[in-house]
Amino acid sequence: MDATLFSMFAFTMVFDSILYRPRQSEDIAQYNDIQASLREGIVNPLRSNFYVRADKVLRLRTLLDHCSTIQGLIGEEKDPEEFLNSLLQQTLRADPLIHLSSGQESYLFQLFISEKDDAILLPTTQQLLELSFLQSDIKLSEIPSCLILQMPRFGKDYKMFRRIVPSLYLDITDILQFGIRECTICGSLANNECKGCYQNFGDSLDKITFCDICLSKSHRNPKRSKHQPSKIKVNEGYVHFTKECRSDGDAGAEAVREKMELFAVVCIETSHYVAFVKCGPGPRAPWVFFDSMADRKGAEHGYNIPCVKPCEFLPQLLQDTSYSAIHKYRDEKDLPDQMRRLLCDGYMCFYQSMSLVQYR
């Protein structure tokens, strides 16, 4: 819970709407108490003093334990998804962050890979997100202000991949239901998607989109003759805009890729969660490592001592050019401690849309 709260509020405002929404008739009776406990007891001192008293965290734990179906929040370490369910869904009734084309709504997205691709030796969250949406045959019906990804693992006992690299930026253009996409062959506006072409022209979702002409030409190949492409839903206003550009002899504006920025990674090794958190937006913002139980004073009746350390290695590590250096460490035990935690123990990745962070 401590690592999740630090990730959500220390350096970003993407969750600030839940701190100020007035109580409505549908809200629980303790709504104002929970909101005030979160805002005044935790978020304000965290941002002003970079320190939160243990009794303030215990106060929030107690309120959530009494007011939600998630039991054991007072004295037990709960998984982040249980805490998010208790806080966002059951007590503060925040608007769902994720809206899917299937009509489902959620506060986080579980990366689910039904067919593991053995060719992916060092997967990134970008690859796993695209593969998960492709295999599930779903899209995002709108751009989320925050996208929380839960890694393909089951607690601390099972991990589908030994290591996962959190992508610094997540391109969600190709998983948007109404995204503006380009033809993989000629670069013009694409209005067809062919899932059967995945890995024919490349191993990303921007390689399975075609305009009508290129779709017809490429699928004359006997290997692709039985593919079943589907139409891409394109905003009519954008279609009209591109036609006007062509009539004026202009190629038109290049399609803008919709990207989200990584701002936190919550990790688990045994039953204890830690977090890597970005100290602000932009590529030059530094990263820190947060551990609420880094040290301890006393024994049974003692107390934990939290720690925040700079992570100067992290931005460089997550660049594409560093993947070969990661491969050199064949055994996880040989990885430096913080690097091992980030790559091997990742549990949740938090992404934000910088264009929507202050509007939702």
Image: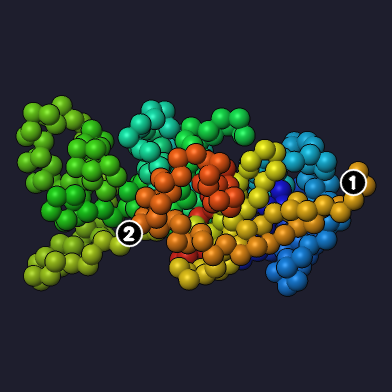
Which mark's residue is nearer the viewer, 2 or 1?
Answer: 1
* Front position in the image: 198 or 15: 198
* Front position in the image: 351 or 27: 351
Residue 31 visible in the current orientation: no
Position of residue 30 relative to residue 77, above or below, is below
Mark 2 vs mark 1: which is more N-terminal? 2
* Front position in the image: 223 or 137: 223
Q: Position of residue 139 (x, y in %)?
A: 38, 42
Which element is circle 2 on? loop
Choose top left, top right, bottom left or bottom right for residue 71: top right
The amino acid sitting under disc 2 is: Arg
The circle on residue 257 is 2
Q: Residues within 10 Å of mark 2 (few under 14, many from 20)?
A: some
Image quadrant occupied by the C terminus: bottom right
**Is 17 displayed left or right of 140 in the figure?**
right
Residue 322 visible in the current orientation: yes
Which element is circle 1 on? loop
Tell me what residue is drawn at x 52 percent, y 70 percent. Answer: 285
Q: Position of residue 242 (x, y in %)?
A: 18, 62
Q: What's the distance in space between the residues labelled 2 and 1, CA to CA?
A: 53 Å
Judging by the rendered image, the residue that carries numbered circle 1 is 299
The amino acid sitting under disc 1 is: Ala
Tell me what residue is drawn at x 6 percent, y 34 percent. Answer: 220
